[in-house]
Image: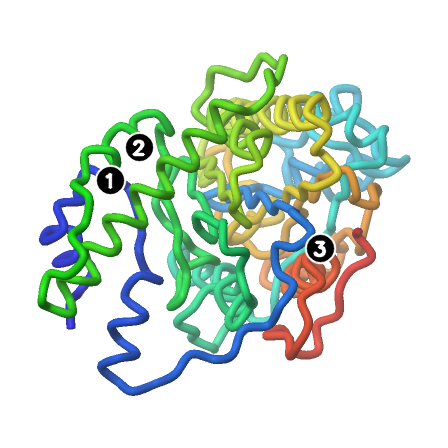
């Protein structure tokens, strides 16, 4: 048996950013005698991509989708409430933060869905525990080892040419994709990844030791994956799009290149941190939402030019929202429910679910109106058309796609 750190050390792959959870599975099964579940066919056959965007720190939903006509909003936030004039109207009562202006054309094209009040019963306000709940798709008092996507894809047959289940940009935490049987590549710089992977020596036919044989096989898998990614990325058509220079904007650029090159991968995960806005929230939140909006707008423009926007769904998530009322530092503290965005050429744009009632707070927190697992069930069943028993039980898909 070999742990992950020993694997990286022994194989000399410390310079190659690969999370190789799946690569231990054959060794562990041989040691335990367990057989893998028979695969279900169909996954990946439609060539669809899912882009997950983690808004790390807990995005403030009330200043993202703003109930500007509700007087209680200004009573709860006398210093940080946003003025109606600077908002992007969704309807007569709600508007998007003005920094999300780049998303306005997507909203008008009915390719942007706002899902209100996402959360779960008995919410947890710890960053670490709540993001674990969101990543595994669990109840508040339930502890699951695998991410919700890893569980959804158990036993699902992947195309032979698939280089990995996911490519992680911006952060090396697979989150929803963490689990046995999953292959997740961390790709901060595609060219650098290809160059370092090419330095790995070709594996001999047989090393005479089961664990070492597997390590050498992993080396070869990394070489092949890196070569495939770089070849397809270079062959991608010109995106004709200026991406923001921010870290998130460059993640969007890489994601667009991977999709335009039709790199065989199912999920691309992006990361935007800094949403833990306990103090001086107004300028910090405006900057973060500006990076989010401009990055996603450029991503959409590039994929529309490539004729691939209909094959992509983008979904945001965060560990929690913020308290309904502001704190004494012109910021907000850890809260509960919040809205999230779903974008794509096949997305049914508009508002979905019900905005939380500011007159029905519990412990000064918003009460969720849409269980977050309904969004996950939507992606699993309506986007990928996965069959078999759902890990989300009674949670029914939303009418988003």
Residue 202 visible in the current orientation: yes
* Residue 217 point in image, percent of width and height: 24, 56
Disc 2 on helix, strand or loop? helix
Dot in front, 3 or 2: 2
Q: Say which mark, if any, is on residue 364.
A: none
Please tell me whether residue 255 is drawn above or below residue 129 in the rendered image.
above
- Name the residue furthest right: 92
- Name the residue furthest bottom: 33
Disc 3 on helix, strand or loop? helix
Which residue sits at x=17%, y=62%? 213
Apparent side of residue 95 relative to residue 134 in the rendered image (left or right): right
Q: Say which mark, if any, is on residue 383.
A: 3
Apparent side of residue 366 relative to residue 351 in the rendered image (left or right): left
Residue 123 visible in the current orientation: no
Instruction: Judge by depth and name the residue closer to the eye, 188 or 219.
Output: 219
Which residue sits at x=51%, y=71%? 154
């Amino acid at each position: 048996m070999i742990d992950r750190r020993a694997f990286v050390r022994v194989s000399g792959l410390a310079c190659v950013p690969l999370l190789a959870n799946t690569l231990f599975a054959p060794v562990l099964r041989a040691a335990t005698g367990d057989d893998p579940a028979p695969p279900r066919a169909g996954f990946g056959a439609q060539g669809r991509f899912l882009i997950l965007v983690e808004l790390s720190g807990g995005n403030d939903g009330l200043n993202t989708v703003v109930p500007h006509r509700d007087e209680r909003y200004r009573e709860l936030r006398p210093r940080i409430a946003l003025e109606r004039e600077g908002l992007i109207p969704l309807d007569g009562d709600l508007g998007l933060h003005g920094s999300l202006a780049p998303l306005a054309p997507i909203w008008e094209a009915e390719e942007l869905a706002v899902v209100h009040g996402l959360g779960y019963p008995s919410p947890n306000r710890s960053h670490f525990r709540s993001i674990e709940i969101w990543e595994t798709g669990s109840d508040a008092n339930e502890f699951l080892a695998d991410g919700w996507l890893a569980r959804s894809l158990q036993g699902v047959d992947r195309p032979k040419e698939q280089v990995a289940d996911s490519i992680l940009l911006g952060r090396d935490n697979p989150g929803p994709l963490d689990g046995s049987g999953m292959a997740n590549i961390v790709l901060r710089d595609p060219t650098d990844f290809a160059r370092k992977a090419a330095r790995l020596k070709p594996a001999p036919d047989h090393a005479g030791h089961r664990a070492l044989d597997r390590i050498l096989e992993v080396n070869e898998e990394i070489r092949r994956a890196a070569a495939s990614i770089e070849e397809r990325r270079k062959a991608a058509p010109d995106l004709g799009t200026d991406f923001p220079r921010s870290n998130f904007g460059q993640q969007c650029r890489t994601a667009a290149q991977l999709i335009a090159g039709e790199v065989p991968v199912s999920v691309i995960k992006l990361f935007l941190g800094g949403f833990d806005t306990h103090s001086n929230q107004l300028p910090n939140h405006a900057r973060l939402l500006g990076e989010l909006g401009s990055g996603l707008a450029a991503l959409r423009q590039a994929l529309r030019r490539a004729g691939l926007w209909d094959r992509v769904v983008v979904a945001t998530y965060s560990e929690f929202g913020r308290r309904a009322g502001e704190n004494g530092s012109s910021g907000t503290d850890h809260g509960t429910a919040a809205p999230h965005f779903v974008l794509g050429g096949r997305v049914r744009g508009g508002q979905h679910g019900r905005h939380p009632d500011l007159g029905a707070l519990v412990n000064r927190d918003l009460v969720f109106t849409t269980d977050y697992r309904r969004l996950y069930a939507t992606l699993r069943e309506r986007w990928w058309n996965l069959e078999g028993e759902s890990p989300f039980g009674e949670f029914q898909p939303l009418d988003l796609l």
